[in-house]
Structures are given as structure tokens and as C-alpha cells.
Amino acid sequence: MALSGVCARRGYKLTIVTDVNANSRSISHMRALGAEVEVVQSLDAAGGFLGTRLARVRELVEMPGGPLWTNQYENVANPEVHSKKTYRAIVEELGDPDYLFVGAGT
């Protein structure tokens, strides 16, 4: 949802590929912000949806004029930006925390 907001504010076109487990209110919110949201339905070979989502993203990227994929799974800048900026942003907003609990996922 955050990326939908950033793209809406900056006028960027955004395509989100998610699955049937995604929160329907979140999908509605992303669409309201102008994102195109595709919901995959088929399970992958492992019995989940990650493989199906990634396969669809690859299909989109390979299309002529297809989107740019930032690829959070393989982009080395992903953990680096959190290391350099996320904690600092938390401290600036809330002060130095005694504990920090971080959810793992997308």
C-alpha cells in the first residue's frame, strides 16, 4: 500500500501482483490510489503463491514496454536501505527504542 501512495503522489504507473490471500481492503485501497492490481489464483509447485506471483511478474517484465521490476527479493539495495535509513527514521520519529519488533514478509 505504501508504494501505491508514493506512486500516486509522484504520478507513476504501478502494477501490483498479489494473491488470493491479500487483504481485500488493501487491494481496494491500492486500486483507489491508481495501482493496477492483479490477483493470482493458482498455487505454485510448493503449494503456495510466491512462485505464481513471481512467474506473473516475469511475464509482465518480458512484455514489450513492460514494467520495471525493482525485485525486492534480489535487489541488494533492499536490505542496505533499511540498514542505513529505516532505523534512523524510527529514532527521529519516536526516539531510541528499548526494543524493536519487525514483521518479516512483504
Image (cartoon, rainbow, N blue to C red):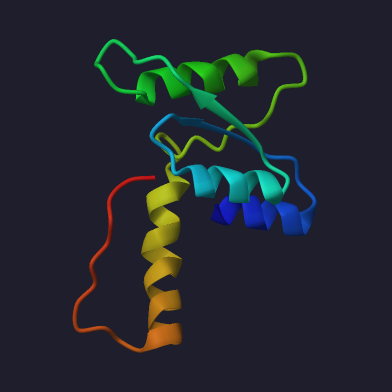
Q: Residue furthest bottom?
A: 95
Q: Position of residue 6 (x, y in %)?
A: 66, 57
Residue 46 as seen in the image, left or right of residue 1? left
- Looking at the image, is 12 positioned above or below residue 39? below
Rendered residue at 75%/59% (across/down): 9
- Looking at the image, is 101 positioned above or below residue 19? below
Residue 24 as seen in the image, left or right of residue 59? left
Rendered residue at 45%/84% (across/down): 93
Q: Quadrant of residue 65?
A: top right
Q: Quadrant of residue 94?
A: bottom left
Question: How many numbered markers are drawn?
Answer: 0
Specify the quadrant that holds the C terminus: top left
Q: Nearer the viewer, residue 95 or 103?
A: 103
Rendered residue at 45%/22% (across/down): 54
Residue 8 as seen in the image, left or right of residue 105? right
Residue 22 as seen in the image, left or right of residue 99? right
Q: Residue furthest top?
A: 45
Q: Position of residue 63 (x, y in %)?
A: 69, 14
Q: Quadrant of residue 58?
A: top right
Q: Position of residue 50 (x, y in %)?
A: 37, 25
- Looking at the image, is 36 positioned above or below residue 46? below
Rendered residue at 35%/89% (across/down): 95
Q: Position of residue 104 (x, y in %)?
A: 28, 50
